[in-house]
């Protein structure tokens, strides 16, 4: 090779880069191929896992829709049974979680407050916040009150004041006052009723709150 050819070869950046790449491949081809194989396995596993979850969610949502239809038809025992099956079979899916809420609703309207409370608690263990979480808290508060567990209902009602619309907030203060009165805590009941009148005087419950204050004070 002439001196000029050598200089041209040595000064060619692409030739140098290609040489470095070839040298790297010779030294590390096993590692590179092994890493590529691992990435391929991980990618395939992720794909099949996601597809399996999507398939499970589709099946769960279909069954939950059946339970929801039964609920609105007033067949609470059957709705509860189907929703419970969804929760057991598809517990890791969004519909499987929502099945606990529907099971609680069906149990509540069937008068089974113990089961309703347990299902709402299970739901809230995984869905504490957001619209659905607050809706479950509201249902749990009503369940506690209906089941005679007034002391457990009060803090939930208090937490929900200001969460939904103004009419709902007034309702929660009224419910909290009702529970406190049932627990013979007259001062606490009046405090909530006074707050209802002061902060939510434009709601439909304001007049009833004033009447209840008078009734409690007269006792």
Image (cartoon, rainbow, N blue to C red):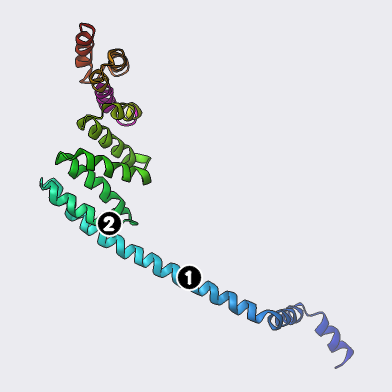
Q: Is 47 in front, or is 203?
A: 47
Question: For residue 118, which quarter of the picture?
Answer: top left
Q: Secondary structure at mark 2?
A: helix
Image quadrant where one finds the C terminus: top left
Q: Residues within 10 Å of mark 1 (few under 14, many from 20)?
A: few
User: Marks 2 and 1, Cα distance to the nearest angstrom?
Assistant: 29 Å
Please tell me which residue lies in front, 171 or 22.
171
Image coordinates of residue 122 in percent, x first then y, are: 32, 45
Instruction: Pinpoint residue 150: horizontal percent, then vertical percent.
Output: 26, 27
Q: Please state the extent of the stretch shown in magenta in the rendering.
A: 162-176
Vertical position of residue 158 compared to residue 118: above or below: above
Query: Tag 1 or tag 2, which sits nearer the N-term?
Result: 1
In the displayed structure, 177 sits above or below 33; it is above
Q: Main secondary structure of the magenta part?
A: helix
At 25% from the left and 62% from the top, the residue drawn is: 59
Where residue 60 appears, as percent x and y from the top left, is 26, 59
Residue 75 image offset from top left, x and y in percent: 10, 48
Per the image, is 164 magenta? Answer: yes
Q: Residue at x 15, y 47 (%)?
A: 71
Q: Is residue 37 above or below residue 187?
A: below
**Residue 184, label in figure:** none
User: Which mark's residue is nearer the viewer, 2 or 1?
Assistant: 2
Considering every residue shown, the one lying at the far bottom of the view is 1
Q: Nearer the viewer, residue 194 or 110?
A: 110
Q: Quarter of the image containing the N terminus? A: bottom right
Query: Does residue 102 show up magenta in the picture?
Result: no
Give the quadrant of residue 134. top left
- The quarter of the displayed image where residue 24 is located: bottom right
Residue, disc 1: 43
Q: Check disc 2 and report the residue beneath it.
A: 88
What secondary structure is found at the residue carrying circle 1? helix
On screen, residue 170 above or below 197: below
């Amino acid at each position: 090779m002439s001196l000029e050819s050598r200089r041209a070869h040595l000064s060619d950046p692409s030739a140098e880069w290609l040489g470095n790449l070839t040298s790297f491949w010779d030294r590390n081809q096993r590692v590179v191929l092994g890493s590529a194989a691992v990435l391929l396995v991980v990618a395939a596993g992720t794909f099949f896992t996601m597809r399996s979850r999507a398939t499970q969610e589709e099946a769960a949502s279909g069954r939950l829709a059946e339970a929801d239809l039964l609920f609105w038809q007033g067949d609470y025992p059957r709705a509860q049974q189907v929703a419970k099956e969804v929760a057991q079979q598809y517990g890791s899916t969004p519909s499987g979680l929502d099945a606990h809420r529907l099971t609680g609703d069906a149990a509540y309207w069937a008068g089974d407050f113990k089961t309703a409370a347990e299902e709402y608690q299970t739901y809230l263990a995984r869905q504490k916040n957001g619209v659905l979480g607050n809706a479950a808290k509201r249902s749990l508060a009503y369940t506690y009150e209906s089941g005679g567990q007034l002391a457990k209902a009060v803090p939930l009602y208090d937490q929900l004041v200001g969460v939904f619309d103004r009419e709902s907030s007034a309702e929660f203060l009224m419910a909290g006052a009702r529970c406190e009165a049932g627990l013979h805590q007259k001062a606490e009941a009046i405090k909530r009723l006074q707050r209802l009148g002061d902060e939510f005087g434009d709601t439909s419950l304001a007049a009833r709150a004033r009447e209840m204050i008078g009734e409690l004070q007269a006792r």
